[in-house]
Amino acid sequence: MRATPGWDYIFIVRKFPFLQETLQLKLARLLSKTRTFAHRGYCILCIELGDNLATVAQKNLAAYPQVEVRNIAFEDWVTEENAFDLVISATAFHWLDPSIAYKKTAQALTSEGAIALFWNEHVHSDASNGFFEEVQELYQSLAPQLVKDDEPPLREQKILNKTSEIQQTGLFGEVVYHSYRWDATYNSASYLNLLNTYSGHLNLDRITNTLAKVRA
């Protein structure tokens, strides 16, 4: 069972006469979704920067001969111009240099191609009954190193989206934005599992040791 709803991947789809090809980056966290596309007959070219994640992806997608996993950075991938119908990125595009990523994506797309960007954003919910505001006191006392990374969630209306950024590139047509609000309920065990997926929490000992050395 997954503790997070996490999306963290990009893929591009290229249409052939009977087939579509997908280029996917940061795919390891969405292997189940990748398999869904592969099962439907898409040829998938996956790009994954992490060595370990690329190995996991190769293993889990081995049943699909039309799927290729390349262990390479998107910036280093040699663009196949005018070759793809769709670029999809889920919680990954912000890691890329926008001055490179948008231009490279536009070059890879056909004239009828499209880019679709997705993110999971943690927003304020009245259903939490003030939990995230109150827990800040515990972070301040027990793990102040995480306070910056664990600020109370923003209101939904304050979440920034990429609409203006995409429009300003002048590389794409009409930009359409959709937001889907939902609440997830956690018990103590599932919430601890969720925290254990956050890099700040996972690296807490390393951060603490580093700060101790700096202060020494």
Image (tube, rainbow, N blue to C red):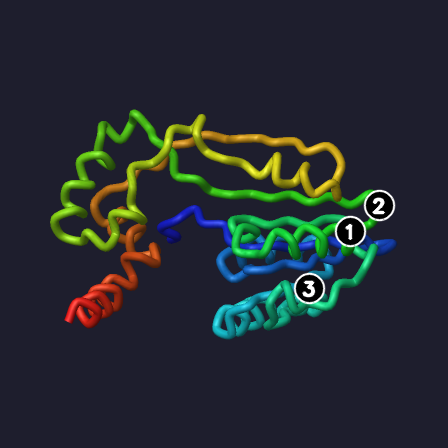
Left or right: residue 83 versus residue 197 is right
Q: In this view, does 186 lie above or below 63?
A: above
Question: Splitting the image into 4 quarters, where does residue 200 fall?
Answer: bottom left
Foreground of the two, 135 or 102: 102
Q: Does residue 121 appear in the picture of this structure?
A: yes
Identified by mark 1, the residue type is: Leu
Q: Which of marks 1 and 3 is nearer the N terminus?
A: 3
Residue 141 coordinates in the image, percent (x, y): 12, 48
Q: Is mark 3 on a helix, strand or loop?
A: strand
Q: Earlier in the sequence, mark 2 or mark 3?
A: 3
Question: Which residue lies under the disc numbered 3?
Answer: 45
Query: Could you tell me which residue is drawn at 28 percent across and 41 percent down?
Result: 186
Asked whether the residues under the numbered discs 2 and 1 touch, taking CB atoms below 8 Å apart as contact, a structural biologist would say yes
Q: Nearer the viewer, mark 1 or mark 3?
A: 1
Front residue of this view, candidates 7 and 77: 77
Q: In which quarter of the image is the C terminus?
A: bottom left
Q: Mark 1 points at which residue?
A: 109
Say which mark, if any, is on residue 111.
2
Q: In the image, residue 6 lies at what x, y percent?
A: 45, 49
Asked whether, in this view, residue 68 is left or right of residue 147, the answer is right
Q: Residue at x 25, y 47 (%)?
A: 147
